[in-house]
Image (cartoon, grey):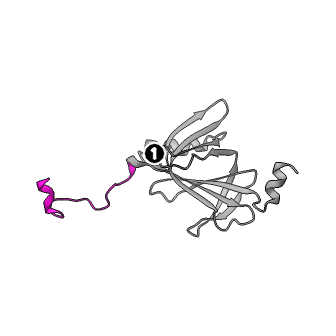
Amino acid sequence: MSLIEECYASGRGELVDTVEGRELGSEVSHLYCAGYEDRTCTTEDGRTLTFTAMAMDYALPKNDNSGFQNIVMGLDNVTGEVQEVIEASKEGGKRFIITVRRYLAEDLSFPQERYRMTLLSREYDTDTDIAQLTAGFFDLLNTNGLRTVLTTTLAPGLKYI
């Protein structure tokens, strides 16, 4: 039995990878899925979305506590749509949020895995028409460390520090 046959016989079935990209605060999502056919999937918050099929691949980082947990993904950029969307967001000075979901092909009603990340860098190869995106799981620079900002009116002892 070949490795592919073992994978399908193990009960895990085919995996469907999807990517949702949007500007922070925007209602417009750009939806893509790996493969040759468009898929309609339900997200973890109950939205039913139709993902456009395209060639894509990504590499997950090792799971550790370092600050370098970045995912690198390659998306087909033949039409230039990926580049246009991302560059418009960056020109506007807005953060671009990428959500990668993995579904089982026989159950598209809920994702089996979900990763929400911030786009850190992008690179476009004009020879191969591939958009290479690097996104971070843990974006320390864009997080608000303290949810309550301590001031001298809230904590009077601060003026003595």
Counting the numbered discs, the total is 1
- Seen as rendered, the residue at the extreme left is 160
Q: Nearer the viewer, residue 49 or 62?
A: 62
- Seen as rendered, the residue at the extreme top is 127
Give residue 118's position: percent from left, percent from top: 48, 49
Give residue 33's position: percent from left, percent from top: 67, 53
The residue range painted magenta reads 142-161
Majority secondary structure of magenta residues: loop
Name the residue rendered at 58%, 35% in the picture.
124
In this image, 37 relative to 59: left or right? right
Q: Is 147 covered by the magenta stretch?
A: yes
The disc labelled 1 sits on which kind of residue? Gly
Name the residue rendered at 67%, 60% in the picture.
103
Quarter of the image holding residue 76? top right
- Seen as rendered, the residue at the extreme right is 1
Q: Is residue 84 above or below residue 30?
A: above
Q: Nearer the viewer, residue 101 or 4?
A: 4
**Mark 1 falls on what kind of element?**
loop
Q: Nearer the viewer, residue 50 or 66?
A: 66
Q: Is residue 42 above or below residue 94?
A: below
- Seen as rendered, the residue at the extreme front is 64
Q: Is 154 covered by the magenta stretch?
A: yes
Give residue 153's position: percent from left, percent from top: 15, 63
Q: Residues within 10 Å of mark 1 (few under 14, many from 20)?
A: few
> What residue is disc 1 on?
67
In this image, 10 relative to 70: left or right? right
Q: Is residue 141 above or below residue 48?
A: above
In this image, 72 relative to 14: left or right? left
Name the residue rendered at 15%, 57% in the picture.
158
Give residue 106's position: percent from left, percent from top: 75, 65
